[in-house]
Image (cartoon, grey):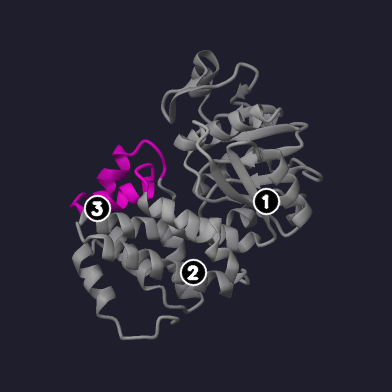
Amino acid sequence: MKIAVLGAGGWGTTLAILLHRNGHNVTLWEYNLEYANTLEEYRENFYYLPKIHIPKDIKITNDLEYAAHNKNLLLITTPTQFIRNNLKPLNNHKFKDEIIVSAAKGIENETLFTVSDIILDIFNHSKKDKIVCLSGPSHAEEVSRKVPTAVVSASINHKTAQLVQKVFSNSYFRVYSSSDLIGTEIGGALKNVIAIAAGISDGAEFGDNTKSALMTRGINEIMKLGLLLKAKKETFFGLSGIGDLIVTCASKHSRNRFVGEQIGSGKKLSVILKELKMVAEGVATTKSAYELSKKYKIEMPIVEEVYAILFEDRSPHLATRNLMQRNLKTETD
């Protein structure tokens, strides 16, 4: 297939290399012209994926329209909050049969749209049954080194999901298919919020019991919102639900867990984000998740406390006390 990877961060570069290894014709688009030239010259993503060689026959460009022209599949790997502005030049492109795959994990702040909603809003001629979400426990640092990994390809059209499953699968990257697009998107986006909470717990040195409780109750909050949006319950017990949550809350590679850990140890969010090389999607998604909980009038106490810590300067210890002293409930509430 002829494939454009839109976004040359660590994940975009990793997937471009993976798709090339799978025998596809790959073009990698980088937003910054100077960095696109650096990638082209040195064939290494020094900033986001050091020591991983980019094959010479992967085309690298800063020209978005050139990258997207005459492709069978577009893979979007730019952070969610940048997708709308970054892809504006393609507004008038009449996508019809092209498959659009999202590997971003977030919810847009202004609209509260998932990535598939953003795509449909930007590309007026695209069809929802041609949109796929690729999600699951998959750090670029590991996939780029061929560490065995399993993810999910989800679309409302199961045949489209299965086609993407075949395009991406190989000996170290196993893809399962799903027809639950919204559930896969919600799981991938909100696990980053819970990962910030888990990181805060680590930074504050609360211990394993606390982090386990946050993860378990966190998947309950994610599922509560997902079911309200017509997702399937079983999705949240799969790779894009509990699977992605586990790796993001526990891994040294997780940017969202790292942000939380730094906050838990006493650093300010503004300082952390200035020092962070890559985007931690969970920070912006916390705002969206908080707004969604208010919009739909559902209790999401962990989301609310993370929001208060990030944006209202609430102390992690007060937030934890608030969670522990809530009215007693049954476990299924």
Residue farthest top in this picture = 41
Q: Are there few (<14), some (14-19), or many (20+) residues within 10 Å of tag 2?
A: some
Residue 328 x %, y % = 32, 86
Dot 1 corresponds to which residue?
132
- Look at the numbered disc 2 and give the secondary structure of its residue: helix
Kindly report which numbered mark, 2 or 1, lies closer to the viewer in this rendering. 1
Closer to the N terminus: mark 2 or mark 1?
A: 1
User: Residue 130 in the image: x percent, y percent?
Assistant: 75, 50
User: What is the distance, in whole Å, between disc 1 and disc 3 at their CAs?
Assistant: 34 Å
Distance, label 2 to label 1, CA atoms, is 23 Å
Residue 327 spot, x, y in % from top left: 30, 85
Q: Give the range drawn in magenta.
A: 251-279
Residue 189, position in %: x, y?
A: 50, 56
Compared to 154, does 323 lie above or below? below
- Above or below, comparing residue 254 to residue 246 in the picture: above
Disc 3: which residue: 263
Judged left or right of residue 89, residue 293 is: left
Which residue, given by chain and number where applicable, does mark 2 sit on? 292
